[in-house]
């Protein structure tokens, strides 16, 4: 049995200093006993194919499953129990009192154990589950959807613990009122809000889902997980692990349930508008996310939607290195991350130590760098991976047509042959160049491998356009390359006001949009990209209330 | 110059232990140099009568003022500058950058100084301003609307400081990515949400307004104060003090402005729906409060509306003492507090050491105790004070008629002659007895001196009815008298679930509904009485975001 308390204490220190730390190995090859664990996980995933997923839920009315692997384009054939939402809420409510009454340590240590079991016993099964639903590469499924997501879960527990421990459980209070000295014994109890619904997205489920679930559970709530119908398996595994653990420790497993729906018959609004819905965590489209924010009331809403992410390339000490980093990050998982850069704002000339470089040269360099990265199918497979949703291919076609009419295509998109999965749904990046008036085209998230080079009047204009688009249309990340420190300071101000997290002059092997748990804040809430930050106290504190009770100390009035 | 840092540190300790503390004397007679300060404050108030209130605001389009003293029923005749909302928002936005850039200590110490100036230089002017707008007694205006409200302001600063200091300003983060050791310098800046609008209520403006204003200002936001048109003066004085102080310290005074409207031409929805409105603090009616909660988005909403407050009298060790406490608290400021008990749920027999006492006897005792309290006009003046709004008198008439048809009137309401103000709007409490089916009558806040005795089937039924009404209709406070510890434990559970703060078996000179800053949590957010708690981190944390910027440490990629 691992010392979860020590791990949590170390995580608390990391959240305070925000220096690097993780209890997990960052790469599969460093995983303990990987030679056994990796194939065992893959076999466990493969054994699920074409079966009924074993999950005991309340109120099961049937079963369904419509996942299709982006790697094989064949159905996974896994059928999940489908439960009646009323029954899920009723079971969750019935489960609440025992969980709410458990002390803080009991809840925290159980949840740490749940994360640890996902890591120890299910990580490589999850890797393949993520690959064949979200379409991520093996390495990204291990890191981004695996250990980094577990880190974000632990981080949520750190903030939950701090928020709960900040409330003293009891106090003695005494004051004179006229003739009487009044002495009161006061007790303060943490009251969970109730039943939370956690919506997870198709392309990156666990990274947002685990911190959301754990923030709710740690503070005493129950959680109904509502996965995107295209990406159920990673969440079904998660729910099964937590249910078994809860039951084993004497708690009602209905604290964590799964509500599976279908694209044809969505249940999202039914869950949100259910009278027992107290908390909504939502990751997904901006359109539905804004509906959630405006309509979840009286439930609390925590959202992360989409990023219109911007790059200002005003100058660079090493232009080639900057272009390489940018190209790599724009290719990473075919830009199907909410943090992927999409829009590159260029002044007429880019400032370098060798003199100014014309915009069109730089645009060409970027297109060429992308082309080189995806030329080799093996490397393309590792970086681009696959396209999660078929409609992304249609979107690429539409943007190409628009750009051809209104600007130019710098690099066309094509399918590339995946070295292991010949049927994989793939697309190399489309890079187009447009004027800054084509905002209807570029000033929103175009989900998938689609990049825009945008002609601006000057470096200052590029910064203005980029941060205005980020503020108006919801930027999560921003990237600036510049040699002038005054310009960099102005960019820091402008991006902070726009509410996008900024990375400056970064080159090298780290993906530019890598967000580290315990260190990087994800989403500010200052623009339309969502209202919840991973992780601030604001992500956790509203999930419980403080109820107090006071009575005279024995022997006083 | 006082040591505000030491005071704030002491307040922080009080919030942690929740033991009694206040830097202020609780009674006027203990105020330093009260013999000079009290008459000077009164004279300053009287000098304002019939004048133009001197307040320099941006965008002034005219002036208005429709306050009427509940003590004299004569207009105060004070005319306030009326500003255009667009101009107020524009001025506030222009003022933001300098304030947001100030360091935490600068903001906190300035705001502590503002509270201290209200205390040192304006407290007795505020006392008379509150008396002649809200209609409170002199003592309540001093304590509840004066020093206790200042305490709640300091408490908000404690939570603001903790929330802001929890974010480290910078970090160095390093990790290996493939071939590269990436070392990043990260900076984290606190970004205020923007412009807050603080709505204040007619009967108890400062107690909610000061903590709301200070929570917003401490975290770097600007505040537009929108007072109820019947109670402008206390807030106008507050705004003037903070504007002068800001200007004196080199900040833009437009960080704090006043938006006066009229009953005929309300501006509330205009302010909330303004595109620059980022935060709404609302105290007032449940009806408008629920509209705010549902419609403020994308602005944050912090609400406190009204309390359907319940008493379960199942038994008492000293029945007379319990009845006296209950009667006094039901009379306090004519029950025009959101914490005033309204509904007394009685089983058929009340358990006492001398045996069971029949319900009707207890109901009679309560009516008699109230009658005795208000019989002497001098004492009535001190306890009941006046009726803030004329429509309360109509409500009393309506409830009396309803109760006469559906139950009985235990104690009728009448005007009492105020010893100092012969024209005062006064009403002694109406106490009626009804069956538990008359929920349409009693199961919501009936603002004013109106009490209900509700016949229940048993003590358990009384608890069930009371907590169900509190949960469904928004209870802020709950009161239980019982001798059985098992029943008390059940009541603690039930009230915690209902979301009302509970007081048990309290007798003596403390008003049962007294809520102490630094110790008592006010409003849970678990029922319809509002979503904001004075004070939890949740009241402060969402008012700012964290924006980060990261770049390679010198000499690394």
Image (spheres, coloured by chain):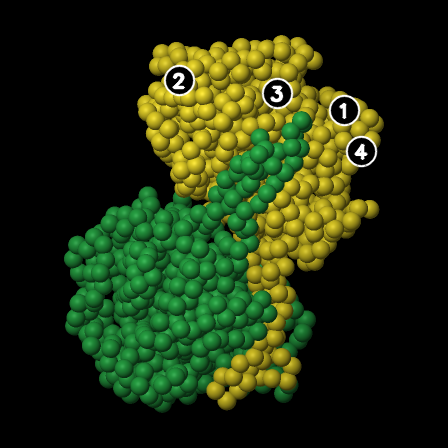
Chain colours: A green, B yellow
Mark 3 and mark 4: span between their CA atoms?
A: 25 Å
Q: Secondary structure at mark 3?
A: helix
Mark 1 lies on residue: B42
Question: Is residue A469 something one can see in this rendering?
Answer: no
Same chain shared by disc 2 and disc 4: yes
Between marks 2 and 3 in the image, the one whose residue lies nearer the viewer: 2
Residue furthest out toward the front = B354
Q: Secondary structure at mark 4?
A: loop
First-in-chain label (3 vs 4): 4
Disc 1 packing (10 Å; few <14; some 14–19; many ≥20): some
Mark 1 and mark 2: span between their CA atoms?
A: 49 Å
Q: Nearer the viewer, residue A405 or A225?
A: A225
Disc marking residue B358: 2
**From the viewer's perspective, is A546 left or right of B233?**
left
Chain for disc number 4:
B
Disc 2 packing (10 Å; few <14; some 14–19; many ≥20): some
- Write the residue at 22% across / 75% down: A73
Mark 3 lies on residue: B383
Chain for disc number 2:
B
- Write the residue at 57% across / 63% down: B547
Q: Nearer the viewer, residue B258 or A442?
A: B258
First-in-chain label (2 vs 3): 2
The mark total stands at: 4
Q: Secondary structure at mark 1?
A: helix
Q: Is residue A384 shown above or below B26?
A: below
Mark 4 lies on residue: B32
Q: Secondary structure at mark 2?
A: strand
């Amino acid at each position: 049995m691992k010392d979860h308390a020590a791990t949590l204490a170390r995580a608390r220190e990391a959240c305070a200093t925000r220096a690097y730390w993780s209890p997990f190995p960052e790469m599969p090859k460093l995983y303990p006993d990987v030679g056994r664990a990796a194939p065992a996980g893959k076999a466990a995933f493969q054994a699920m194919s074409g079966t009924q997923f074993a999950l005991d839920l309340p109120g099961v009315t049937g079963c369904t499953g419509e996942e299709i692997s982006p790697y094989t384009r064949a159905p996974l054939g896994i059928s999940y129990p489908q439960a009646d939402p009323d029954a899920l809420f009723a079971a969750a409510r019935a489960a609440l009192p025992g969980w709410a009454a458990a002390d803080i340590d009991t809840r925290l240590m159980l949840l740490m154990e749940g994360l640890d079991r996902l890591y120890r016993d299910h990580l490589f099964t999850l890797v393949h589950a993520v690959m064949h639903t979200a379409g991520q590469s093996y390495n990204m499924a291990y890191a981004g959807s695996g250990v980094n997501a577990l880190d974000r879960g632990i981080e949520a527990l750190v903030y939950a613990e701090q928020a709960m421990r900040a409330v003293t459980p009891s106090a003695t209070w005494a004051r004179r009122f006229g003739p009487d000295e009044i002495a009161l014994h006061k007790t303060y109890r943490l009251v969970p809000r109730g039943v939370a619904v956690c919506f997870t997205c198709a392309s990156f489920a666990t990274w947002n889902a685990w911190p959301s679930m754990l923030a709710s559970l740690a503070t005493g709530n129950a959680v109904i997980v509502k996965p995107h119908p295209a990406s159920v398996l990673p969440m079904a595994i998660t729910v099964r692990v937590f249910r078994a653990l809860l039951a084993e420790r004497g708690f009602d497993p209905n604290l964590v349930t799964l509500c599976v729906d279908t694209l044809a018959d969505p249940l999202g609004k039914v869950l949100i508008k259910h009278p027992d819905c107290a908390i909504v965590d939502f990751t997904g489209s901006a359109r539905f996310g804004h509906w959630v924010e405006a309509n979840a009331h009286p439930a609390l809403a925590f959202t992360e939607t989409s990023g219109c992410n911007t790059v200002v390339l005003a100058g660079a000490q090493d232009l080639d290195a900057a272009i390489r980093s940018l190209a790599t990050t724009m290719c990473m998982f075919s830009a199907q991350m909410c943090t992927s850069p999409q829009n590159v704002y260029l002044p007429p000339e880019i400032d370098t130590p060798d003199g100014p470089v014309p915009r069109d040269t730089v645009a060409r360099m970027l297109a060429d760098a992308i082309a080189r990265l995806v030329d080799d199918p093996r490397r393309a497979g590792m970086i681009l991976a696959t396209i999660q949703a078929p409609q992304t291919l249609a979107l690429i076609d539409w943007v190409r047509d628009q750009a051809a009419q209104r600007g130019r295509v710098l690099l066309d998109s094509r399918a590339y042959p995946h070295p292991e999965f010949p049927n994989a749904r793939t697309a190399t990046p489309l890079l187009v160049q447009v004027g800054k008036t084509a905002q209807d085209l570029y000033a929103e998230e175009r989900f998938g491998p689609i990049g825009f080079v945008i002609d601006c009047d000057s470096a200052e204009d590029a910064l203005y356009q980029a941060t205005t688009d980020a503020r108006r249309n919801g930027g999560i990340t921003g990237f600036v390359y510049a040699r002038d420190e005054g310009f960099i300071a102005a960019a820091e101000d402008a991006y902070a006001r726009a509410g996008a997290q900024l990375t400056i002059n970064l080159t090298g092997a780290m993906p530019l949009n890598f967000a580290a748990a315990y260190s990087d804040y994800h989403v500010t809430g200052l623009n339309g990209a969502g209202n919840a930050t991973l992780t601030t106290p604001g992500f956790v504190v509203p999930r419980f209330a403080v109820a107090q009770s006071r009575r005279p100390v024995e022997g006083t009035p």
